Amino acid sequence: MKDFFNLQTLRRTCAFLPEDRIFFYEKCDSTNTAAKKWAKDGNRGAALFAAAAQTAGRGRMGRSFFSPPKSGVYFTLVKTLDRPENPVGATCAAAVAVLQAIFEICGVTCEIKWVNDLFYQGKKVCGILTESVVCGNQTAMLIGVGVNLRPAIFPPELAEIAGSLGDEKTPRVDLIAGICKRLLSFLKAPSSEKWIDDYRRYSCVLGRKITFQREGIVTEGTALEITVDGGLLVRTASGEEILRTGEITLRTI
């Protein structure tokens, strides 16, 4: 299989963005870092930063994202907004955009683990990192996406939890374009009506026992509902509460 992934194919496939707003790297530290610099330099509008590999891919909670060459899709879409976007809602919308694009283009149905991970066959195949940068009177929203498209040899610490879509045929530029079109649509008219139903439908946490940390204390509970703004309603021994930040772990027993 030949997967022509370069600046020319990226620009041709993502023709809905101006050519000078599409950036490609054979290797970079992090596409989110490159996109953040672009926004801080005073640029406005939307831009795409994609890499064939990352040396310091970033995930949530300060973690790294394994980004080897030839196997994954790694990119950041940045767009300046007139008003700040709810970061939890933006992350949820991004998860749905990725899920929908993967289904349409690769024919694979994933599940969503609140708030930003996509799972396939019980393993994580996608991570999403949303960040915002204040630029004068506007806010730049950065949505970083990493998808394990092809099979890869993961390091030992990831071998049991990370997987791939197992797709050997889909050009990486096609998946990037499909995701970005949906992301831009969601950001153009930010309303949970566009994504909340699918987010709930493909959630793998609702009704499940979970644990989460709060001020360093591990708390157990049951995930009850995804709120309209992307929060997770949880029932604990002390009552019900809505999580809007942090990370949850699914209990297996």
Image (cartoon, rainbow, N blue to C red):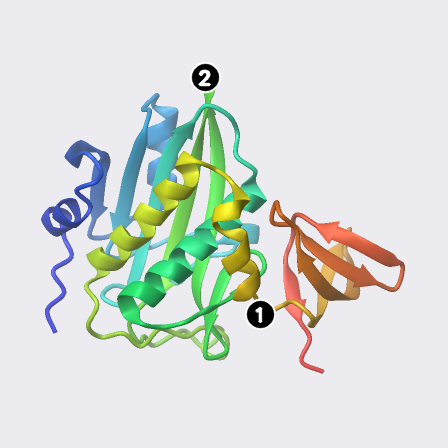
Image point (49%, 51%), residue name: 195
Could you tell me the amino acid type at mark 2? Answer: Gly
In the rendered view, tell whether residue 29 sits above or below residue 204. above
- Displayed quadrant of residue 109: bottom left
Identify which residue is drawn at 15% across, 44% down.
11
Q: Position of residue 215 (x, y in %)?
A: 78, 51
Q: CA distance from mark 1 to mark 2?
A: 39 Å
Q: Which residue is mark 1?
A: 204
Task: Please report the residue visible at 41 percent of the width from the left and 61 percent of the height from the top.
Answer: 99
Q: Which mark is residue 136?
A: 2
Q: Callout 1, which amino acid? A: Cys
Q: Nearer the viewer, residue 13 or 216?
A: 13
Residue in view at x 22 percent, y 75 percent: 168
Residue 93 % position (x, y): 48, 49
Of discs 1 and 2, which sits in the foreground? Answer: 1
Judge whether 142 appears above or below 225 on screen: above
Mark seen at residue 153: none
- Relative side of 22 to 83, left or right: left
Where's the C terminus, which quadrant?
bottom right
